[in-house]
Image: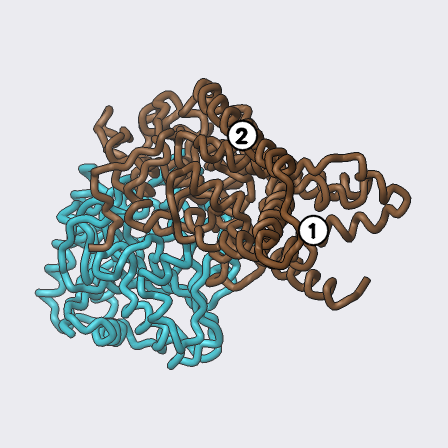
Amino acid sequence: MNPVKRRSFLKTTVSAAAVSALPSAPLGAQQTAAPAATVVVVHGKDIPKMLAAGIAKLGGWEAFIKPGMKVVIKPNVAWNSKPDQGGNTHPDLVRACVLAAEAQGASKIALPENTCHDEKSTYKISGVEAALKGTKARLYRPAKGDYKQVDIPKGKVAKSAGVPKDILECDCLINMPVAKHHSGATLTLSMKNWMGSIANENRRAWHRDGLHQCIADFSTFIKPKLVVIDATRIMLTKGPQGPGDLAHPEEIILSTDPVAADAYAATLFKKEPFDIGYIKLGHEMGIGCGDLKKIAIERVEA
Amino acid sequence: MFTRRNLIRLILFLAFALLALGLVPAAWQPWRVLLPALSPLLNLGGATAAFAVGMVTPFALPLLILPLFKGRFFCWRLCPMGFAAETVSRLNTRNAGLIRRVPFIGKGLALVILGSAAAGYPVLIWTDPLCIFNGFFSAWRQPLTWSSCGTALGFILILAASLAAPNIWCHRLCPLGGLEEMLARLAERLRARGPGSQPPATDAERVKVGRRVFLGFAVGGVAGLAYGKVKSAAAKAAAFIRPPGAVDQNFNALCARCGNCMKACPYGLIFPDLGTSGIDGLFTPVLKFRSQNESQEQFCFQECTACTQVCPTGAIRFLSKKEKQQTAIGLARVDKKKCIAWEKGEYCVVCQEFCPYQAVIEVDHKDVKCPVIDEAKCRGCGACESQCPALPIAIVVEGRNPQTPLSAPSPQLPE
């Protein structure tokens, strides 16, 4: 632990010194000072506006979706829980993203989601089904035939998994979890959200084989272009199903680095990111940066 | 053969078959109770035995009133089971007269059913033709196994009997036919008392009929009472899980094996029992969660009351969503030796994640959260069992018979 700390300390102090001492330094020098990851945190009340503001900060939708692309959004819509209970991704956020994808000219928008509760009821109660009315997005629970078994070459424990074909074949993958307490994994954030995509037998196997390592293993394989974490309201207890105690940070968290997004989101729960197994492993395996000191957090009000 | 009469019967046959098969829009599904509920034997027999009048009770009226004026109109013109039996009977022309030597057993059957129902334990209620018809078509499911189609047996037996001895079912064996026949005769006799009609039956005849009816009732009553006494020792209460709303005391007697609850379950959790609920519980409905059905990944969903809406006899009472969520059909048990949290110290508590009633308590054991069941909250819905990652499954639901109403509030109830 110690050498890592020292190194990171050195880096941050050196880069801070560089930035402050040389405000007009040449480009090369600035790049060594550049943070390992950027997380955009948008605070506000109007969810579509918040998403638009956050995306603008990341370079606009053009950076993610080009006309004709197949887009997959992975919300967390697993439980028979109402929007204000914080068990699922907020329907307004899902809708805003789908509308943006349509506006960008996406050829296909799919939302495969393996619910934990009865899917008909879950899609309805969560408000997501209604939110998608009038759009061309398809929200569905993958059937057995919709999965394809894939290898995870860099996985240490999880070596393969069944993944919905839509996810494998898409051009733009957006991970859109809700941040909430989780009894088994401490917190559900973006990396954990993929457990709602993989086949049930893999999900069960991951619990047997070591949950955090398997979550990190899968993230060596799956590469979302964009992570949007819904932290408009967060469930602090009784997760993942709830109902539990709520807090209202009124934030959405955007990043292209899932580990960094998760690391920031963990702080909303007053947790050290590296106390959460999969964030620590994700950082160590080089999936992204979980070290808050190296993450640039850009705050936006919307 | 293709007369108008047969065309109507064919249409009815197909309509009721589609209804029983569940090949109708979702909103119509609860109407699968209609056909079996038309039979006064199932409907009134059940209501009498259970001391409960339900929403389906009025469905029994048509077949009580119709025979008074039209004889066995229902049997010859409408009954889908009768249509099937008659059609098959036509295939055998050589033995057409075979049934002449057989007495009308159906009349006795009807009396025994009603007599025993009055005693609280209707015996032989499952011989009702409408329930047998329904049981055949509601048995089809994916995947079909020998044990999953137990309720289809009666229909096959009737057709086989009709092939061997034409018309034996409708004319000799059918208890509903027997009831209709008796009601028709009763009406005839009452009309005969009116002015200007045939001479009334002699006293001797009347006594004979009265004696038979009394005897049938008495035999039924004694059988019912005896059955109630013997039955109690039959099965271990924890060995089987009944659908929510199942009555406890006389379930095996009340259940007509019509297969409605099994087919109504959107998750395919309910199967015909093969003996865990006692010998007399053959083909009665029991729930099989994942430990008994490997491919099952669903559980008795807290928002669903489908099976409670379709019972024609009241063996399964109608439950509101609130009542369902307060009814414990079973109790989950954790086997610590198999549990990956208790035994291997892995992060898991998937059971706690999935429990809709927050009935799994987490306790710290060697720095890992481990599951313990809160018996006051566990409804036995099987959510924990449906996704337990342990091999073999470490959390298994056992039955609670009688089903206990819980006072602990359900977190699922709308506020």
Give amino acid for label 2: Gly
Q: Position of residue B122 (x, y in %)?
A: 50, 33
Indicate the quadrant where residue A134 lies: bottom left
Residue B25 horizontal/vertical position (percent)? 52, 64
Left or right side of B397 for B288: right
User: How many numbered marks, from 0 up?
Assistant: 2
Q: Residue at x 31, y 65 (%)?
A: A127
Q: Quadrant of residue A274 in the image? A: top left
Q: In the orientation shown, which residue stands out farthest toward the right?
A: B94
Residue matched to label 1 = B82
The percent position of residue B201, horizontal first and vertical second, equals 64, 44
C-alpha separation, residue under disc 2 versus residue under disc 1? 25 Å
Instruction: Please give the name of the residue rendered at 23% of the width and 56% of the height, measured from the top-left corner.
Output: A86
Sequence-wise first label, 2 or 1: 1
Helix or strand or loop: what does disc 1 sit on?
Answer: helix
Which residue was labeled with disc 2?
Answer: B220
Question: Which quarter of the figure is the C terminus of chain B placed in?
Answer: bottom left
Which chain shows up in cyan?
A
Q: Quadrant of the N terminus of chain B?
A: bottom right
Chain colored brown: B
* Residues at marks 2 and 1 on the same chain: yes
Within-10-Å neighbours for mark 1: few <14, some 14–19, many 20+: many
